[in-house]
Structure formats: structure tokens, C-alpha cells
Amino acid sequence: MNKKTLFISVSLLIIVAFIAAVVIFQTKETSKNKNVSIDNLNIVERENAPTKGSEDARVTIVEFFDPACETCQVFYPLVNDLIKKYPGKVRVMMRYAPFHQGSDQVVKLLEAAHKQGQFWPALDILFANQQSWTRHHVARPKSAIALLKGLPLDHEKFIHDASSNTIIQSIIQDVEDGKTLKVRATPQFFVNGKPLTNFGYAQLTQLVEQAIAEAY
Amino acid sequence: MNQISTSDTIPKEWVALFFVWILATISTIASLFFSEIVKLPVCVLCWYQRIAMYPLVLILPLALFPFDAKISRYAGVLVIFGWLTALFHVLLVAGYIPKNAQPCVQNIPCSETHLNVFGFLNMPMMSLLTFSIMGLLLLFVKKSDPS
């Protein structure tokens, strides 16, 4: 065998091995995903987590998010559109995945605002002004608190709640469930327990439409 | 094969260099498989090792056809860089280097490993081994360089 034949055949062998590995892995994954989604339902959703949309909706989008995450901010109006597009059929549940430095403090504020029914207005403010309370991907909780001053909150209780045990427990549970569900980047979506494996708005819409078709 | 060539046997230096290329290509494809298909997170140190590894896949064939022993000089510098980074990474995972010395993104710690073969072979260890073998093979190729 001459050198060139050797080189070409080894190259081909490596390429074929790679393609085979990809195909084998992906068939395994898809069969795994089908079973996993049902078992996962109890850890994908958390009782008392902030939700938007009709309580009777049969399709729940769960979003693991970080308020400091730019992609989450970009997706926020798109997710809202999905709720509007299918009124009564779709609701969204937000769960915390504070990956950015300093975000762990900011999600405590959101959860404290949630306790007074002000989660969504607070999130609106934080996303709308994301640039002013994050610097180089580092969240600055003090700036975030200043922004939330305008909300109709009992501020003393709000600040006190933000460091209370119950709120920290909720966040720890979100972080733990995120780890179990292998949430490594934000936003990560689950629609009725099924993870969005191929990231993108069109793919999310498709997953939601599929869930609606199954549920209604 | 009925090729008309000066010698039927392929020189050992060529085989050594070819083997370095095979190692580089398999490492490249395997690392891409784990990050792009399996979606394992890639930490900063892994990226530095990739920077050293990936160019070899394209550069080495140029020195295989026709054979050019001088490649050991150009590929060698990449292998040394990759080897040092891998060594740092292995020591970090083993705990010999304090965690705060690592140049890492918060959510992808380099001190965490995802794959373990035979209990001791994690990714940085495999990388260190691969770069070591490549270095030795390149030394062998360099010996054949008359200049």
C-alpha cells in the first residue's frame, strides 16, 4: 500500500467512525428523551414558582432563566407572544438558573417580589434595563434593588424576604433541579416536560404547537 | 499494489509523522463529538488545548506529501504548548493547583471532569498522554532531519 492510499483510507475510516458515532448517539438520545420527559415532570415544575397564563392551560412552558442572561432577555417577549397566541392553552413557568456572577442575589429579589405578587412587573423592569444593572456579564444586585424601588412593594418586607430561608430554599431547589435536568445554559425550555434540544425560537414554537396538538 | 517506486517499504519517520496526524485527527474529532453532539460543556483550559491540537490536523499532511522532517519544529511548538496546558489541567483536576488559580467561567469549572475511562483516564489526562506521545514521535522525526 502506498502512502497516499494509506492516508486516504485512514481518513475515510475516521470520518465513517465519526458519522457512525453521531448516528448511534442520536438514535439513543431520541429514544431516551421520550421516556425521560414523563419521569421528569415532577422536577421540571415547582409548586409556587411564578407562572403567567391561564391556570387551566394544558401546555406549560418551563423556562430556566437567569435575569442577567442576554438571550433570556431576547426570548422574553417571544415567550409572551406564545401565551398571547394561544390564549388559555399555554402558560409559562419561570425557574431560576443564576449562572452569572451576582445573579444569585438578583434572583432572590425576584423571588421576594414574587411573594408580594410582583414577580412579573419586577422581571419586566430588570429585562428592560438589563444593561444598567449588569456589567461585563456580572450582575450588580444593588443597582437591581434601586430599579425595583418603583414597584408597589412593602420594601422593608421585600428586603427582609430576599434573605429569608424560604426564598433561599426555593432557589436552591431550582438550582438542584436544573442540575438534575442538565440545564447548562440559559434559557433552557421544557414544554410539558419535554426539553427543547435544538435551541431556537422556531424550534420552541414547534415544540409548543406539538404539545397543543397532543393536549387539545 | 503494483506501484513502481524506489522502495516498497514506507520509511519509519513517515509512519511516525503519520501516526502523529492520526492522533491529532482522532483527538479533534472526538473532542468535537463530545462538545457538539453530546453537548458536554467545554472549559477554557480545554479550549487552549484545542488551539494546539486542531491546526495539526491540517498542517501535518503538508509535511507527509512530500515528507518534510522540518515539520517537527513547527508542529513541536504547538505540541509543547498543548502539553504544558494539559499538564496544568491535570494538576488542577487532581487538586495540586488551588482552584482560584484557574482561568474559568463560573458555570464551567475546569476542575470538574465529565468522562472517566478505567477510573483514571479523564479528558485532561488523555490530552496529556496524547500530547506526550506526539512529542516523542516528533522527536523521532526530527532525528531524521539532516540539517
Image: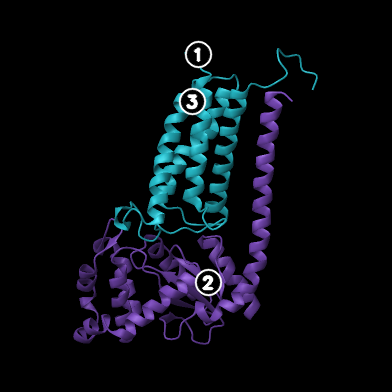
Chain colours: A purple, B cyan
Give the quadrant of residue A29. bottom right
| In the displayed structure image, the side of residue B83 where residue A118 appears, left or right | left
Residue visible at 50% across and 69% down in the picture = A189
Residue B141 point in image, percent of width and height: 53, 24
Q: Which element type, helix, strand or loop, lies under badge 1?
A: loop
**Real-space Cα distance between discs 2 and 1?**
63 Å
Q: Amino acid at mark 1?
A: Pro
Q: Which mark is residue A190?
A: 2
* Chain letter for the residue marked with disc 1 in the picture: B
Q: Secondary structure at mark 2?
A: strand
Q: Which residue is mark 3?
A: B72
- Residue B80 appears at what percent x and percent y? 42, 35
Image side of residue A43 versus residue B101, left or right: right
In the figure, is residue A177 to the left or right of A113? right
- Label 2 Cα neighbours within 10 Å, binned few <14 / some 14-19 / many ≥20: many
Residue that label 1 marks: B146
Question: In the rendered structure, which amino acid carries the disc numbered 2?
Answer: Phe
